[in-house]
Image (cartoon, rainbow, N blue to C red):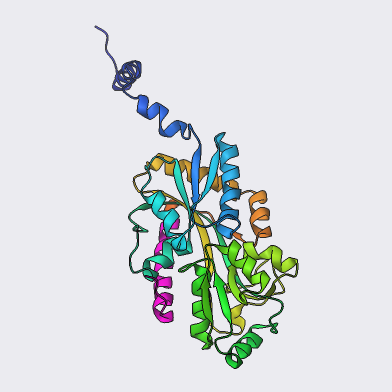
Amino acid sequence: MLRLSSHNLLAVVLAVAVAFGVVAPFATGQSTYPTRPVRLVVPFPAGGTTDIIARATAQKLSEAWGQQVIVDNRPGAGGNVGSELVAKSAPDGYTLLMGTVGTHAINPSLYAKMPYDHVKDFVPVILVAGVPNVLVVNPELPVKSVPELIAYAKANPGKLNFASSGNGTSIHLSGELFKAMTGVQMTHVPYKGSAPALTDLVGGQVQLMFDNLPSSLAFIKAGKLRALAVTSTARAAALPDVPTVGDFVPGFEASSWFGILAPAGTPPAIIAKINGEATKWLATPEAKDKLTAQGANVAGGSPQDFAKHIQAETAKWAKVVKDSGAKVD
């Protein structure tokens, strides 16, 4: 009689299963992902920081997988429109979100009614980059420092309009925090993204903005905008001569971040594969050089690390929203 060890018996069972197609879903599913183009939703217009970082990431994932990763801009409601689209997409790894501090830390406290649950409806994949905001003014505004801006605002109450990429973004809340901590009066003018806001700022329709550094950097270097300060606790490598807001307003800090998220229920194997490829790219000198040149800092880490970051940031920004009194219906 032929006797089979447990190991050999398992091998025979698997061979029969493969022959009859029983394990086909496993063989052709997660291990070969992706087998078709992947959509990376950016919940803001093209040209802004979220878009810039998403396109750099998408390009590298496309090269690694041999499948196109398509950036799909779906702006609106401070990032809520695009985020809701991903939250309600099939959890198969083919629709991902480039989430932000706005969509996954600020908006839950700012909006009276959210179209998605930023924790339950998503699986964090990887934190891609951290970005300081930069306080920029139109060069026609007669101020060249944060103290001069505060003095001008107090001498001209109600005359300053500050732009943002939309209600609830870190750009909006940076301005609200500045108002609360300095006592100045400024009117908030929301746009559907950084790009249109910057266009009006350069054109003089609005006077200042707390923009994500990457989208403002080219305008600053071209002399079309004047950088007064960055909102991080330390100076930015891309603008080493520009001080921090905290140098003049002690305790001020309001930075942005960007990371990939997938719909809840996406298989762990797919999450791990996306995280792995993104981690490989973020570890390269090319990624550091590319992101630093844009004013961003390389992040990275595990999905669990990103989940903890979201939890901490949600608590932090909830306090900022409460203290500033900002609300969006």
Q: Residue at x 69, y 71 (%)?
A: 225
> Does residue 298 appear left or right of residue 301 in this picture?
right
The residue furthest top is 1
Across and down, in percent, residue 83 comes to 42, 55
Q: Residue sitting at 59 percent across and 46 percent down?
A: 281
Q: Decide if residue 241 is in sight here.
A: yes
Q: Is residue 41 above or below residue 199?
A: above
Q: Nearer the viewer, residue 296 or 269?
A: 296
Vertical placement of residue 187 versus 293, above or below: below
Q: Main secondary structure of the magenta part?
A: helix
To which quarter of the image does residue 109 belong? bottom left
Q: Is residue 298 visible?
A: no
Classify the position of the C terminus by image quarter.
bottom left
List x then y, in percent, for residue 293: 68, 58
Front-lying residue, 114 or 92: 114
Range covered by the magenta-colored residues: 306-329
> At x 69% / y 69%, what residue is drawn?
239
Q: Quadrant of the N terminus?
A: top left
Q: Which sits in the foreground, 142 or 61?
A: 142
Residue 128, compared with residue 221, is above or below; it is above
Q: Is residue 327 left or right of residue 209?
A: left
Residue 322 part of the magenta-drawn span? yes
**Residue 155: percent from the left, percent from the top?**
60, 93
Count of labels in the image: 0
Image position, residue 269 (x, y; %): 41, 39
Q: Residue furthest left?
A: 1
Residue found at the far bottom of this picture: 155
